[in-house]
Image (cartoon, rainbow, N blue to C red):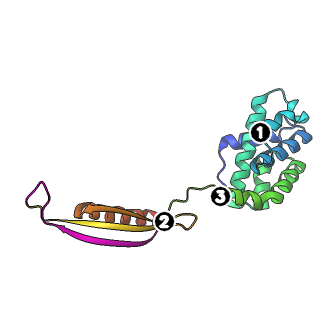
Amino acid sequence: MEISKKVLEGLETCANSSHFSDQAFEDLCQITFGVIMKDKVESDIQGIKSLASISDKSILKQAYASLITFIAECARVDASSASINTTLEDCKFTQERISCFTGIYFQRKHQIRQLLGGISFRLPHIVDTDWRMDYVVKSNSLEKINAINYTINFKVEDQNENRNDVQFCCSVEELQDLVWKLKEAIKAVERFS
């Protein structure tokens, strides 16, 4: 898991019993998971007695933000129980708080992963290509051009499997530049995989 130092500090704040009683921590976990699942709203934190008694609201805010981030990261990487326990132990969580967090997390893990799966930038992807080469002899303003133009038509499919056409015209040089950039992109993807 990729967890920043600030998030780890926030989790350590959650583990500190001088800031959060066991009841306050459990209530914070419940409200945090509720906000992620859209069952609750952030303003509900103020209505919970154990959390309203925390005098330093910046500590509450840091702990809440860290829990949200940690939950999202755990769901993103489909973290195992062992890796979550290790991370929380490193943040000085007691065994009771670890079991409280993991109990709620594994109860809602599937729903959180589904929710995260719906949050993405699914750009349309190319499913087919057509092209045509046009030889331009002359135009209205010039007597003689003698140039080659390419008309490229990409058939793209979006996340809802709707197909659209993306069409553009380019010169030989522009087409060569496009091919070069695509080859460069392929090499970059191969390096990361």
Q: Which mark is residue 125?
A: 2
Image-quadrant location for residue 11: top right
- In whole angstroms, how far apart are the C-alphas of marks 1 and 3? 21 Å
Whichever of labels 2 and 3 marks the residue nearer the N terminus, that label is 3
Amino acid at circle 1: Glu
Q: Does the magenta stretch include residue 153?
A: no
Q: Residue 118 carries which label?
A: 3
Label 3: element kind: loop
Write the start and end of the magenta stretch as one range: 125-143
Rendered view: 43 above or below 172: above
Measured as percent of width and height from the top left, residue 28 is found at 83, 42
Q: Can residue 18 be seen in this view?
A: no
- In whole angstroms, how far apart are the C-alphas of marks 2 and 3? 17 Å
- In whole angstroms, how far apart are the C-alphas of marks 2 and 1? 37 Å
Whichever of labels 2 and 1 marks the residue nearer the N terminus, that label is 1
Amino acid at circle 2: His
Whichever of labels 1 and 3 marks the residue nearer the N terminus, that label is 1
Measured as percent of width and height from the top left, residue 146 is found at 12, 65
